[in-house]
């Protein structure tokens, strides 16, 4: 088996990355400084045969366009200018006309990595989508997210960072050695109590084989690094790609479905957000115990737009099964301190013995699940934050939607949508917030609305 290369997620915080990625060590410089000449030399010197342009399609999964460099000049041209593709096939239903659907996949050089799963030496790069005018394609989820991220920074001074908690089930046929499993019992368990420990820490879900499915399913989770919003979405798509490949190599199945079997724990895709203001993480509560302004805007936006964001974060019928059975999943539009059944919560912040915070305080959005389109979802969160900032009665909104007020009978929090039609109505109610600043194209939202109305 070929040696595995470390997976090059961006560093989680300021300061040097330890250890540096293979390419950073090979090229002798950090990813942000890589040039086309650097990568051309790498392909030549390391005997790389294939270059793979990876990009996120309308379904939220990674796509690949592979090519064999014919010459150094050919490779340099593709690295600098990109390669052609059919946008209507990549983004069906997003409003791209078939008669004018040519797009260019233009790679981002700093994302290059050596594909550890390819049968031949392969250099992979994440690519953005560009139209015939040379500008970012308006219907591209990557372009939509970057536009929302930049708008939030420009209008509110907030550099929004995020990390995803990717939950998933690993499945394999039961063997004689699988004698320790028990339904919904396995959180942070170690081998031999779990068979998939090498692919992520164990979560609570564990499903025995049945007459209709002879697979034993075991739930796991990977928490990614806190990075700027566009990189956070890329990290989720790449992590899911890696997990599917690893499961395949280990004769397992990997599922991100929000529910595998009714009555059992479902798989969420929780996101933690840390708004940075002036280069400093400013999430959660400040030194005075009050919510920071950016956290107030974020929470206010999420409790208003949570139902609409389900169009991007809860996209299959199983999403509603996960939510209605109430196993640590949100049931109402509330926010709370440490409350795992709230739509939004403020989780505990790890601290050292001297009281020093060892990681930034975050605001956690617990509604999305494994069916989510990470790029569109995070773009919606950025837009929702600006809506929260513009809310005139924000104090009253936060008070009536708090989990505490609901427990005390003072809150008026709404229930989370329970059908696709209800999600469609929520989307219609908050379309203006999503379209603001020209971020979400009108024709694309028309397509989403039509799809939801038919479900």
Image (cartoon, rainbow, N blue to C red):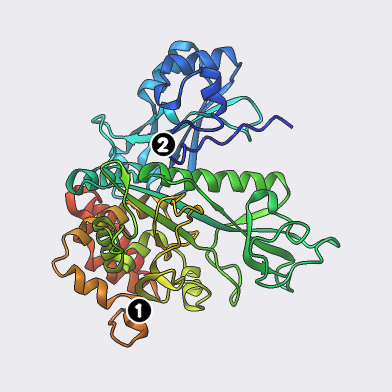
Q: What element carries label 1?
A: helix
Does 78 sit above or below residue 206? above
Question: Residue 363, how many percent across, how many down?
Answer: 37, 59
Residue at left offset 35%, top offset 36%? 129
Number of numbered callouts drawn: 2
Does 332 sit above or below residue 103? below
- Mark 2, residue position: 14
Question: Residue 300, how many percent across, how many down?
Answer: 26, 65
Residues 391 and 324: in front is 391
- Answer with left or right where residue 368 lies relative to residue 2: left
Q: Quadrant of residue 209?
A: bottom right
- Answer with left or right where residue 299 lies relative to residue 68: left
Residue at left offset 45%, top offset 50%? 359
Question: Residue 86, how many percent across, how many down?
Answer: 38, 37
**The N terminus lies in which quarter of the figure?**
top right
Question: Residue 377, how many percent across, how many down?
Answer: 36, 55
- Mark 1, residue position: 404
Q: Is mark 2 on a helix, strand or loop?
A: loop
Residues 139 and 114: in front is 114
């Amino acid at each position: 088996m070929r040696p595995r290369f470390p997976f090059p997620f961006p560093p989680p915080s300021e300061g040097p990355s330890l250890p540096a990625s293979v390419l950073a060590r090979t090229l002798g410089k950090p990813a942000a400084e890589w040039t086309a000449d650097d990568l051309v030399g790498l392909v030549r010197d390391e005997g790389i045969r294939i270059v793979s342009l990876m990009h996120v399609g309308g379904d939220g999964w990674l796509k690949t366009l592979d090519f064999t460099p014919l010459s150094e000049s050919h490779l340099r041209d593709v690295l600098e200018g990109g390669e052609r593709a059919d946008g209507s096939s990549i983004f069906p239903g997003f409003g791209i006309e078939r008669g004018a659907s040519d797009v260019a996949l233009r790679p981002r050089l700093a994302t290059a990595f050596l594909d550890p799963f390819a049968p031949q030496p392969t250099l992979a790069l994440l690519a953005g989508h560009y139209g015939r005018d040379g500008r970012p394609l308006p219907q591209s989820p990557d372009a939509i997210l970057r536009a929302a991220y930049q708008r939030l920074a420009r209008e509110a001074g907030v550099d929004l960072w995020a990390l995803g908690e990717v939950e998933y089930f690993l499945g394999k046929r039961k063997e004689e050695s699988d004698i320790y499993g028990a339904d919904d019992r396995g959180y942070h368990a170690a081998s031999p109590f779990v068979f998939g420990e090498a692919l992520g820490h164990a979560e609570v879900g564990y499903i025995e084989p049945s007459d209709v499915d002879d697979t034993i399913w075991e739930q796991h989770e990977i928490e990614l690094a806190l990075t700027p919003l566009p990189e956070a979405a890329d990290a989720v798509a790449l992590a899911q790609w890696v997990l599917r490949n690893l499961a395949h190599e280990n004769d397992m199945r990997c599922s991100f479905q929000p529910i595998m079997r009714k009555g059992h724990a479902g798989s969420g895709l929780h996101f933690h957000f840390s708004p940075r203001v002036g280069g400093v993480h400013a999430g959660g509560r400040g030194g005075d115990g009050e919510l920071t302004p950016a956290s107030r805007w974020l929470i206010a936006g999420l409790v208003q737009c949570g139902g609409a964001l389900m169009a991007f974060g809860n996209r299959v019928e199983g999403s509603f099964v996960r939510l209605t059975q109430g196993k640590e999943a949100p049931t109402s539009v509330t926010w709370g301190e440490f409350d795992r059944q709230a739509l939004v919560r403020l989780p505990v912040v790890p601290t050292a013995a001297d009281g020093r915070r060892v990681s930034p305080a975050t605001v956690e959005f617990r509604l999305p699940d494994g069916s989510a389109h990470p790029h569109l979802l995070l773009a919606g969160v950025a837009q929702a934050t600006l809506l929260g900032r513009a809310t005139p009665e924000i104090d009253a909104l936060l008070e009536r939607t708090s989990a505490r007020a609901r427990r005390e009978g003072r809150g008026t929090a709404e229930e989370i949508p329970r059908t696709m039609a209800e999600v469609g109505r929520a989307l219609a109610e908050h379309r203006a917030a999503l379209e603001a600043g020209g971020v979400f194209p009108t024709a694309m939202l028309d397509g989403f609305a039509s799809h939801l109305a038919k479900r």
